[in-house]
Image (cartoon, grey):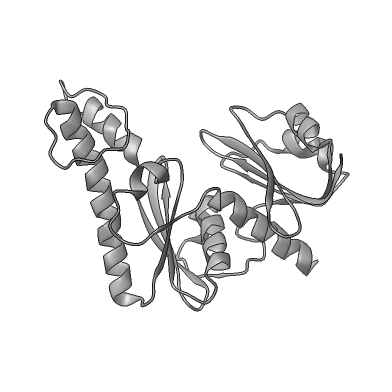
Amino acid sequence: MRYTNMFLVIDIGNTRQKVALFDHDGNLVHLEQYAHLLPTDLLSLCSNYELEAAIISSVGEEIQTLIEPLRNQIPIFTFSEDLKLPITLRYGTISTLGTDRIACAVAAQSLYPNQNVLTFQAGTCLVADFVNAQNEYLGGSIAPGLMLRFQSLHNGTHRLPLVEPHPIDFLIGDSTQNSILSGVINGMSAEIDGLIDRYASTFPNLKVIITGGDSELLKSSIKNSIFAAQNLVLNGLYKILYFNVSEV
């Protein structure tokens, strides 16, 4: 079976490389993750789909070889701050703004248009991004993620072990390992709750979204009402692609 009218989203991150296919209604039809995406992988994945357009977001610069086989077949947008966006960026240094942060903000705005919405990406870093009710992206914050916190405790001391994160239901750690787990996981949850409270005190009717690899681990420890959304960056990239295709 060959699927038609599909949109291709490629997200090349520091540790994960993702390829997603969306239909015209914005439904995620297919998702693959790679340690190192090759042009042959891309061609094989797309062989059963009739593509309309594609967008690629990359933390590096070597993407031309990857997308070359598709270049003469469909319009391909390389994501940058120069693309048209459905939100307005009110950020002081747009050229340094991560594409994942912009994509998250766009996806959040599409879920809650004309509302104050705060997103958290819980991955390598804990990244907060805020879009106001005027659909303006104002910025946010960047802090170490869970693994960076566990690693810093291990690397910065002589005797503390490197602990693997997993869900916990306790406050008081009754061993060194559990004390580290409590400190890092409960500490990050409290940090998220504190940020939510501070934003909500200024921006009424605040909506909050959490995404990223550690979101499932953290969400049960967060006291505030929070919506867990998978693949928020990919959805945001699709929204940006569709917005630009529609504008052509």
Residue 246 place in picture, x, y as percent? 77, 66
**Is residue 27 placed above or below 65 in the rendered structure?**
below
Residue 95 place in picture, x, y as percent? 53, 57
Question: What's the residue at 15%, 21% (across, down)?
Answer: 159
Residue 40 lies in quadrant: top right
Q: Is residue 225 left or right of residue 243?
A: left
Where the C terminus falls, by quadrant? bottom right
Q: Is residue 173 left or right of residue 207?
A: left
**From where the camera sits, is residue 167 visible?**
yes
**Is residue 41 placed above or below 53 in the rendered structure?**
above
Residue 96 place in picture, x, y as percent? 49, 54
Question: What's the residue at 25%, 60% (across, down)?
Answer: 194
Question: What's the residue at 65%, 60% (across, down)?
Answer: 239
**Is residue 27 placed above or below 198 in the rendered structure?**
above
Q: Is residue 181 left or right of residue 229?
A: left
Residue 24 lies in quadrant: bottom right
- The one nearer the camera, 125 or 183, is 183
**From where the camera sits, is residue 80 visible?**
no
**Is residue 240 placed above or below 152 in the rendered structure?**
below
Q: Is residue 13 left or right of residue 217?
A: right
Where the N terminus falls, by quadrant? top right
Residue 74 place in picture, x, y as percent? 84, 49
- The image shows a total of numbered marks equal to 0
